[in-house]
Amino acid sequence: MAMLRHVEWWVCERTPEASAASLTAQVTAGGLLAFSSGALPWRGQVEGDRFRIAPSSITRNSFVPVVVGELRADGTGTRVQVEFEPHPAMLAFVMLWTVVSGLITAYLASLGTLEPKVLVPFVMLPLVGPAVALAAFRFELPRTVAALKAVLPPK
């Protein structure tokens, strides 16, 4: 799972209170699985100096990372410490895909009536889901980092 996580930090010029207020103004309160109208760029929760948010999307892109972060005083500014992790819906889908395709492959292999070359696509199925999920998560990560840095700009 380490490949599906990304940790980053930076220092923002604002105070922790101003940073939290700025972030709160950009977040539609609600759960990460809630549909969003897209009126605000983020959805999730900001509670004091901690937050758990994800970019808002009318199309419900489950590959965008969830941002879990903390705002701490750091000299004259705020240290923004964040961890980007996969969306729970995406993880559930990938796990279901892997298990079901693995069971189908095992069942077909147990029949013993198919030639091995016919089983190759079925053997690949359990590998494709996690590979696509990793590629999509990594593809969405830079956009999510840039969007968060637009709200909490580094010094």
Image (cartoon, grey):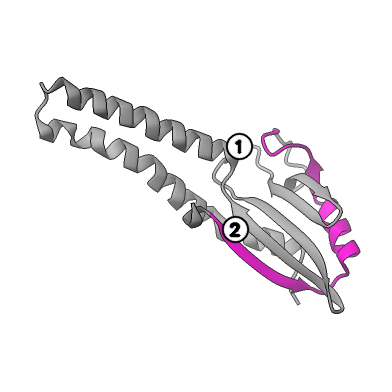
Q: Is residue 130 above or below residue 102?
A: below
Image point (73%, 41%), residue name: 38
In the rendered image, which quarter is residue 87 located in? top right
Residue 14, image x, y percentages: 86, 70
Query: Identity of the amino acid at label 1?
Result: Thr
Q: Residues within 10 Å of mark 2 (few under 14, many from 20)?
A: some
> Mark 2 to mark 1: distance in Å?
16 Å
Q: Are marks 2 and 1 in contact (CB under 8 Å)?
A: no
Circle 1: element type = loop
Could you tell whether 111 is left or right of 137 in the image? left
Q: Choose between 122 and 145: the one closer to the eye.
A: 122
Q: Is residue 56 above or below residue 107?
A: below
Q: Choose between 31 and 142: the one closer to the eye.
A: 31
- Say the numbered circle drawn on residue 133: none
Q: Is residue 113 above or below residue 115?
A: above
The magenta segment is 5-34
Q: Is residue 76 above or below residue 22?
A: below
In the rendered image, which quarter is residue 103 located in? top left
Query: Identity of the amino acid at label 2?
Result: Arg
Could you tell whether 83 is left or right of 97 in the image? right
